[in-house]
Image (cartoon, helix red, strand yellow):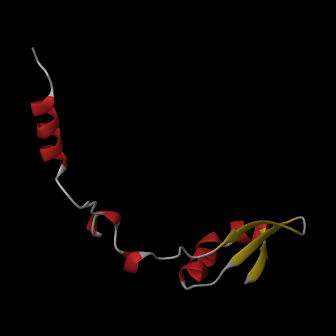
Amino acid sequence: MTTVTLTEFRSHASGMLTRVENGETLVVLRHGRPIAEVSPIAKKDGGQPSWKRKALRLSTKGAGLSSAILEDRAREDVS
């Protein structure tokens, strides 16, 4: 973890962000006090976008929902 002043960060932002891309974490100081921590994004699920990941599958034992609805409708008194 490296500390840099806000002025230094502003003047060399592109180079600082390249350092972050390479895995370094920066702490930005204003008037000697830390105001921000710039760190690389933690990759989840192998870095795949959410639309490429497997979807959540819900399942239950017993009859399916459509079967339960049809049975309930059959039991209703519609007279």
Kindly indicate the quadrant of the structure image that contains residue 8.
bottom right
In the image, what residue occupies the spot 13% across and 31% down? 75
- Residue 74 rendering spot, x and y as whole percentages: 9, 32
45 displayed left or right of 69: right
Q: Position of residue 56 (x, y in %)?
A: 31, 63
Quarter of the picture containing the C terminus is top left
Query: Left or right: where does residue 66 sit relative to residue 10?
Result: left
Vertical side of 41 occupied by 78: above or below: above
* Screen quadrant of the N terminus: bottom right
Quick one: 19 or 62, which is closer to the camera? Answer: 62
Q: Is residue 35 left or right of residue 69?
A: right
Establish if 30 lies above or below 64.
Answer: below
Residue occupying the far top of the picture: 79
Q: Position of residue 43 (x, y in %)?
A: 47, 76
- Is residue 65 shown above or below 45? above
Query: Going 25% across and 61% down the picture, which residue do you hit?
Result: 59
